Amino acid sequence: RRTGEVRIVEVGPRDGLQNESTSIPLETKIELIRRLAQTGVRDIEAGSFVAPKWVPQMANSSEVLNYLLGHPPAAPVPIAFNFLVPNLKGLQNFLKASDDDNAPITSSEDPNKMPTTPPLLKPDENGETGEQGPMISTEDPNKMSSDTSSKDNSIQPNNSSAFSNSMEVSLFTAATEEFSKKNTNCTIAESLERCRPIVSLAKSRNIRVRGYVSVALGCPYEGPDVPPAKVAEITATLLEMGADEVSVADTTGMGTAPKTQELLKALFGAGISAKDLALHLHDTYGQALVNAVVGLEQGIRTFDSSVGGLGGCPYSKGATGNVATEDLLHCLHSLGAITGVDVEKMAEIGNWISKELGRPNDSRAGKAYLAR
Ligand code: HMG
Ligand code: MG
C-alpha cells in the first residue's frame, strides 16, 4: 500500500495544555497556535468548551476562539480549528463565542485532500495576514519552501472562500463505563444520547464534527482489556449519528502493536472505513509510534499528536502526552508519507513551548533536530 498523504491533527493546545497544573496565560496559548499555524499543519485542536470546574485550564477557550476568528493566524494552508464540546451547553458556548465575532463558521474542504498547488502565506511584521505562494518544495514535499514569490491573499474572518479557516467541534465518549463516569459524569449510553443533538445542531450549522472514543486500548479503571467490539459499536454509532470522523483514542497508552491490529480488525469488521477513522495515541508506554505504523499499514491516514509530546488526561492518572508531533512526522516522512508539515519548525515550537511551561521537551526527534 502506498503511504501517500497523511493528515496530522495537532492537539497540543488542547490535549497538551489541559492537564498543566499552573495556569497558562491566554497569550501563551495563542502564541502556540500562531506558531503551529505556520508549520503547514491543517488541523489544530485549539480548546475545549467543558465545565471549567472540571478542567480549569480550558476556561478561556471562548477567548481563544474569538481571537482566532478576529485575527486569523498567518498560515500556508487553510486551517480547521477544533474545540471539544462535552454537551449541548458546550456547543452553545462555542456558537456564542463564534457569533460574538459575527464571523462565519465555514465547513472545511475535505481535510484529507492536500492542496494541488500548495500556497504559502507569509506573515507580515505582525504575523497577522499573509501572502500566497508555493509551500512545498519539489525536493522535499514536507519541507516549507523559502520561496517568497507570492501574491496578496489575506485571510479575513469574513472570507468564506476555499482559503478561509474553519471552526469544528469534537465530542467525546468512552469505551468503558468507569471512564465515562469519571470523564463526563454519565454512562456510555447517556453520553451517546448527549452526542446526538450536538451532531444535529452542529450539522445544521454546517460545522464539521469529530468524535472521540476514549480508552479504546486500555482503561485506567477497568484494565487493559477493553473489548474491541465495544469500541467498534460506539464508533459505528457516532458515525451513524453523522460524525464526520471518529478518533479512536489510546488514552492510557496501554495499546501495543497486536492490540492495535486487533482493534482495527474489529473496526473494519464492523463495516467502518479507514477513511472515517483517526488514531489518537498517547505515549505512556512508548508504544505510540509502533501503533501508529500498524495503523498506517492498515490504511489509517489521520493521526493526532501533540507538539513536544505535551499533555496527559486529567482522568487517566499517570498518562503522559500524545505521541510527539515531531517524532510522528520524522517516522511518517521516513516512510514516504506526505504530511505537508515542516518537522524542523515543529521541533522549534516543541522546544519553545516546553521552556514556556517549564517542562522537559518530550520529543526525542525534536531534540535531535535542534541539536543538528
Ligand atoms: P456535570 O457536573 O455532570 O454537569 O458535568 P452538570 O450538567 O450537572 O453541570 C454542572 C455545572 O457545570 C453547572 O454549573 C453547569 O452549568 C456547568 P453550576 O450550576 O454548578 O455553576 N456546565 C458547563 N459549564 C461550561 N461548559 C459546559 C458545561 N456543562 C455543564 N459545557 C460535564 C458534565 C460533561 C459538563 C463535565 O463532566 C465535563 O465538563 N467533563 C469534561 C471533562 C474533560 O474535559 N475531560 C478531558 C477532555 S476528554 C480527553 O482528554 C480525552 C481525549 O483526549 C481522547 C483520549 O485521549 O482519550 C479527547
Ligand atoms: Mg487525549
Image (tube, rainbow, N blue to C red):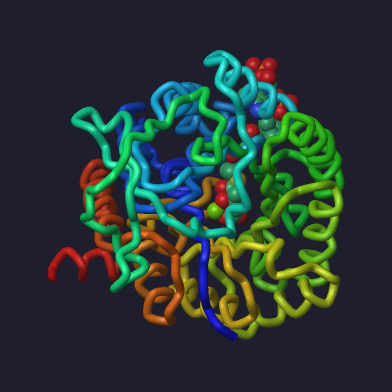
Which quarter of the rendering shows the C terminus?
bottom left
Q: Is residue 147 left or right of residue 196?
A: left
From where the camera sits, is residue 60 visible?
no
Q: Please name the residue shown 35% across and 72% down the image.
A: 330
From where the camera sits, is residue 277 visible?
yes
Q: Is residue 120 left or right of residue 177?
A: left
Q: Please name the residue shown 44% across and 56% down the image.
A: 117
- Front residue of 180 and 49: 49
Q: Is residue 320 left or right of residue 351?
A: right
- Front residue of 200 and 174: 200
Ligand 1: quadrant of the figure: top right
The correct choice, above or below, for 326 with respect to 19 in the image is below
- Front residue of 184 and 261: 261
x and y percentages locating residue 87 in the rendered image: 73, 32
Which quarter of the rendering shows the N terminus?
bottom right
Residue 127, quarter of picture: top left
x and y percentages locating residue 337 in the rendered image: 45, 74
Q: Please name the residue shown 34% across and 37% down the image.
A: 74
- Front residue of 305 and 252: 305
x and y percentages locating residue 214 in the rendered image: 66, 56
Q: How many marks?
A: 0
x and y percentages locating residue 281 in the rendered image: 53, 64
Q: Please name the residue shown 76% across and 69% down the image.
A: 273
